[in-house]
Every structure is written in C-alpha cells, then in structure tokens.
Image (cartoon, rainbow, N blue to C red):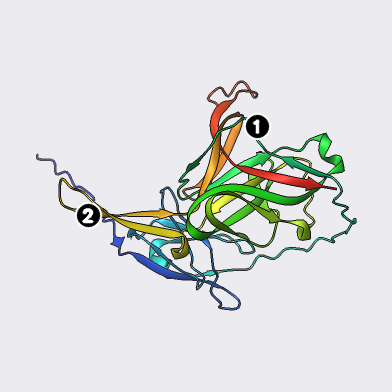
Amino acid sequence: MKKILLLLVIPVVAIAQIKGVVKDSLSGQPIPYVTIWVEGEQMAATTEFEGTYELPALDSGKTIVFSSVGYTKKRVTADQAKTVLLSPEEYILEEVVIAGQKNTKLLEIGIRKNSIYQAFDNGPKIETKFFPYLQAYTKTKYIKKVRIQTDCRLEDALVKLHFFAVDEKGAPGAELLKKDILVTVKKGVMHTTVDLSDWNLVMPKNGLFVGFEKLLIERNKEEKTIADPNSGTTRVQRKYYPFLLYAYVEANFQWTYQEGEWQKKASADTNDPTATLMILEPSISLILSN
C-alpha cells in the first residue's frame, strides 16, 4: 500500500508599501512625530507633522507598534495600518508643590572626562543613558537642563528626548514627562542645551534613563545618488540627521529600544552583578540645581 504525503502550504501574503496616517481617537486630529516600529525587524518610521507615515512592503501579518507620549501604545497588523487611532492616556495630575528653586547651585552630571566622543548613525532605535541617584544630589535635586552632543550636516534637524523612570526590573519604565520634548539641533558638531526648569522635575531616588530618538522624517533626511563606476549603476544613499556622539566606556549595562521592545545589553557573566562590559554611551549630561 502506497503512502501519500500531504504538504500543507500556508501562503504568506505580502502587501505593498504601507502608507498610513495616525490620528487622535477622540478629536480625529493627526498626531505628529509618533514613533513606529515593526516588531522583530530593524525597521522603523516617524509620522510627519500631518500624521502621515510610510513603511516598506511587509507581510500582512507583521505587527507594527505605534507609541507617543500622552497616548496608549497600540499594536496592529500591517493590513490594518492604513488609519491608526491612538487613545489619549488617562492619568491623574499630581499636585505640584513649588518649593522656590533658587538656582544658586549648579551641578553637571554624566560628563565622561578624558573620553573621545565619536559620531555614529544610531539607526532606528532609542538609545538611553542611565543616571543613578547619589546622596550628593540632595542639595541639587531639580533637573534644570539636559545637554546632548550631536553631529548634524543639515541646517537644522529635529530630535525627541525621553525621560524614563526605572521600573521594578531596573529597565526604562514610564515616561516622567507627559509631553514630547522636541529639540532643534543646528548644523555642525555641537552641544545643544534644553531648559527643563518649568517641569519641576526632581531627580528620582532610584535614578532615571534619558533617551535620544532620531526622527525619521523628511526634514531630517539627506539623499544622495551614488554611482558605481564598475557596473555603471546608481543607488540612492539615505541618511537621517543628526548623529548622536558616543563615548566608548565601561558600564554594567545598556538599554536600547528597538524592534518594538526594550533590549538589555549586559555582561555574559550573570553570576557577578558587578560585571561590566564596554558600551557606546550617548553623550548626554544633566544639569542639576537647588
């Protein structure tokens, strides 16, 4: 008796380039600069000011993650991503006690002395730098300013900064500010300082993460046509600015948001909690005041 082998073929449907728009579910207004990630892929996008975005062709079942400060994160499949509605987050406003910031004492933290900073294209990801709390910060508890060092080849570019609390696992948790911090970076290699005084942000006792996000928008894009003299063909080289500067340093860990989730880089020696590794640390510092 002959045996017949049946093969079950499951088709994978690919859809054309995705062009969509992200809107507020209540007002119907477009949401600018929403962060968009394809789960499990090195692929990301940012909505333009009009809420529109584009992604390359994807399998219809691929999951796309949409997130923006002040809105609940949403996951949809590629075939449902033409119009995405984000729901505003509900949160209780904490009572703000103005203690009368004196600003007579300033302390800059996060500077790596004698380090050589280099610019790298950090790609579609959010790079973070961890700032631990020290007892010495008691007299300068307010986060007055944040400073980043970038390399920009355009006249100006727009980036987004994040301030994350530390969750119970020691990873970046909730956003400490309920509004996007958008920063304009000018041309050249330079420091850009952002004043945070109005937020009355106090250095948390378990530290915080500061994240740098490059916006993948037309304003930040530079395209060049590169010719191959051997084959006679051409290709388009696309870059998004600015580049963040990094220092190669020794640290216990590093957290990066990419492929739609937080990923931790740490020493392979899991039995030694003090074990370190060499990482590329973003050039970010904080200025504390009283």
Q: Residue at (60%, 68%) from the top-left corner?
A: 87
Q: Taking 42 as reference, is 117 above or below it?
A: above
Foreground label between 1 and 2: 1
Q: Nearer the viewer, residue 219 or 58?
A: 219
Judge left or right: residue 135 versus residue 194.
right
Location of mark 1 (residue): 113
Q: Residue at x 61, y 23 (%)?
A: 275
Of 229 and 4, the residue lying toward us: 229
Residue at the spot x=54%, y=39% of the render? Answer: 246
Q: Amino acid at mark 1?
A: Lys
Which mark is drawn over residue 234?
Answer: 2
Residue 224 seen in the current view: yes
Alpha-carbon neighbours of circle 1 within 10 Å: few (<14), some, or many (≥20)? Answer: few
User: Contact, CB < 8 Å: mark 1 with mark 2?
Assistant: no
Location of residue 168 (image quadrant): top right
| Residue 171 is at least partly visible in this image | no
Q: Is residue 26 above or below residue 262?
A: below
Q: Quadrant of residue 265?
A: top right
Q: Nearer the viewer, residue 190 or 76?
A: 190
Residue 216, image x and y in percent? 46, 58
Secondary element at tag 1: loop
Q: Position of residue 47 (x, y in %)?
A: 49, 65
Query: Total number of numbered labels?
Result: 2
Q: Secondary structure at mark 2?
A: strand
Q: CA distance from mark 1 to mark 2?
A: 44 Å
Please state which of residues 136 and 186 is positioned toward the viewer in this rendering. 186
Q: Residue furthest front?
A: 188
